[in-house]
Amino acid sequence: MLSTVAIFAMQAAAPVAAAPAPKPPACDTARHGEFDFWVGEWDVYPNLADPAKAPLVAHSRIEKLYSGCAVRENWMPLKGTGGGSLNSVDPSTGRWHQLWIGSQPGRVEFDGGLAGGKMVLTGWWSGIGGPGQDGMVRMTYTPIDPDTVRQHGELSTDHGLTWTTNFDFVYRRAKPAG
């Protein structure tokens, strides 16, 4: 039989299990879900009065990543070069941020949030109209129905006093192959 002293000695020599590390906070709040309507596999068309005449211009894969903390776009045009964006909400301000990087040098940073059920992001885009032609770009993402999102881009070259349409796309949920 082991003595009480021997039992205490064995317990003291046994390694102490470290407390499990706390889990990072989940990004599962309503604020983190505000851009979920854009998540999916999409075929992208110009927004024309007659949708039947709109040619396919791109595919876009929008993914929710990093425990729900980010929304990433992979823009894949049929002609020209692609790019992508990484979107996240700043928990301290509640504002959304988008970092766009295309296949030309530079990046564009957008800032904004949900307004009237639409995601509105605005940023300064150096060279949007060519070398030395900078402007503000305001993008409004509008969920039309579960399978359709409109992305309307407006350009201002006078610091937001006036706006003109720069691009207008309709994202239609891609049909599964097969």
Image (tube, rainbow, N blue to C red):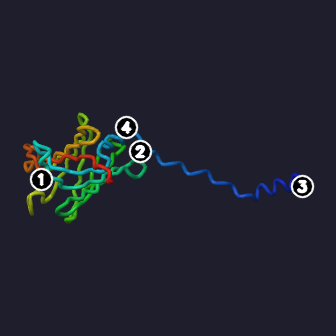
Q: Closer to the camera: disc 1 or disc 2?
A: 2
Q: Which mark is residue 27?
A: 2
79 versus 113 height, above or below: below
Question: Which type of secondary structure does the marked residue at label 1 adopt?
Answer: strand
The structure residue drawn at horizontal position 84% and vertical position 54%, both measured from the top left corner, is 7
**Residue position marked by numbered label 1 in the rendering:** 135
Mark 3 or mark 2, which is nearer the start of the sequence? Answer: 3
Q: In this view, does 57 lie to the left or right of 3?
A: left
Mark 3 or mark 4, which is nearer the start of the sequence? Answer: 3
Question: Which type of secondary structure does the marked residue at label 4 adopt?
Answer: loop
Q: In this view, does 147 lie to the left or right of 13?
A: left
Q: Mark 2 is on which residue type? A: Cys
Question: Which type of secondary structure does the marked residue at label 3 adopt?
Answer: loop
Q: Residue furthest right?
A: 1
Mark 4 or mark 1, which is nearer the start of the sequence? Answer: 4
The structure residue drawn at horizontal position 24% and vertical position 51%, both measured from the top left corner, is 43
Q: Closer to the camera: disc 4 or disc 3?
A: 4
